[in-house]
Amino acid sequence: MIEVTADAVAVAVAETEPQKEAPVVIIGSGYAGYNLAEALRQRSSDKEILLFTADDGVIYSKPGLSNALAREKRAVDLISETVLEIEQRLDIRIHARCKVTDIDADQHLLHTDLGEQKYSKLILAQGAAPIRLTFKGSGAEDVLSINDLNDYRRFRDQLEGRKHVTIIGNGLIGCEFANDLSGKGYAVAVIGLTGWPMDRLLPQEIGQQLQTNLSAQNVDWYLENTVEKIDKQAEGYRLTLKDGQVIETGLVISAVGLKPRTELAETAGVTCNRGIVVNGGLRTNVADVYALGDCAEIQGQLLPYIAPINFGVRALADCLLGRPTMAKYPLMPVMVKTPALPLTLLTPAPNQAGEWQVESSETGMRGLYVSSDGRVLGYALAGDLIGERQQWTDKVAAADELSVA
């Protein structure tokens, strides 16, 4: 007679029962992370979804940070949903204020501040971090970058009682903040390396018109220049520029750009270039690891806007549920939040040869980036001419079809 122990029965039962699949894990609580969680839940009512975030996990509009002052919004006013509300609405588990320190891709295992977590599929949606410049002087460490809600909260606190703000960076974000601050009555100085505002996106004539319009709102420009030193004073800071000019200011903001967060991906052996390299299905070179949003590099490009995330979310949600789908990105114009000169842009694809052709009218300006054979490859519309967005988008789309043919 063979004796069957309780332990043997337990082992036999365990071996015959189907193993529960590990959850889908999302790292990042920005627009990309939460919209992917929502898309997954819409497609599957029972899929287990966990989300890890190093911050407090609330939902707010990050693009709205650069014009929140004009809208008289405090940090708390920008919050649309708390972690508890999100968990209840989407039936997911959120680990807020928890840092993921390492990814063991072979074991499908995360190492976090709270311990280890298995995953079936892993999505990196960590966004991008501000580029930090180094400066000399006693005030160098006080320079603010406004990239999330906590940054904005500090900015509003430190803005209290100030009358003058200096912005380092003459790109899109720097110009949006300059418009926002000057529109609320603050004197603003903008320091930039290049010759006109938003030079990577705008032809010179339109960039200079933006500069003129913002100058009329009490914005001073220090272009083709850099900051050498930032010294604390009793009230604010004293900036010394490369050309020797000195600026007395109450607050210093850095808006020189963002760098995709790739450090965690690299611990898993994921290929990273400017960002986390993914294919059209948002898949990395490592099995079951994906990337979405500002941290991802797609066909050699970074797409740090809301529209590409929306298209990527739909495709990735299907992929994660076993329905392989390639994300398709239509042409996606960008509306710039500069009421001093309303702008809509469709930037030419990288390495496309052409030149800007600019026309002005009483109501606005039209810049077309045109190839040698007359195809419109991109545009910049200003003033009332932003209403022409669709017709020029169609022209660029037609040019794309011709180039493929």
Image (cartoon, rainbow, N blue to C red):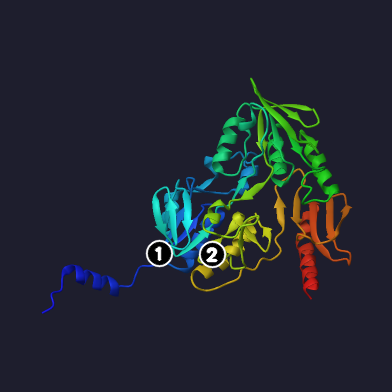
What element does badge 2 sit on? loop
Q: Residue at x 73, y 31 (%)?
A: 228
Is residue 277 or residue 245 the one in the foreground?
277
Q: In this view of the protein, can residue 74 be seen by the observer?
A: no
Image quadrant holding the N terminus, namely: bottom left
Q: Residue at x 51, y 53 (%)?
A: 28
> In the image, is 15 to the left or to the right of 39?
left
**Residue 155 pos. (x, y %):** 60, 35
**Residue 131 pos. (x, y %):** 65, 44
Q: In this view of the protein, can residue 242 be seen by the observer?
A: yes
Image quadrant holding the C terminus, namely: bottom right
**Residue 175 pos. (x, y %):** 73, 42
Instruction: Give the residue type that dot 2 points to.
Output: Val
The residue labelled by disc 2 is 286
Residue 22 badge: 1
Q: Nearer the viewer, mark 1 or mark 2?
A: 2
Q: Mark 2 Cα within 10 Å, few/some/many (few <14, many 20+)?
A: some
Residue 310 badge: none
Q: Quadrant of residue 295?
A: bottom right
Is residue 388 or residue 262 the one in the foreground?
262
Instruction: Give the residue type that dot 1 points to.
Output: Ala
> In the image, is 119 to the left or to the right of 184?
left
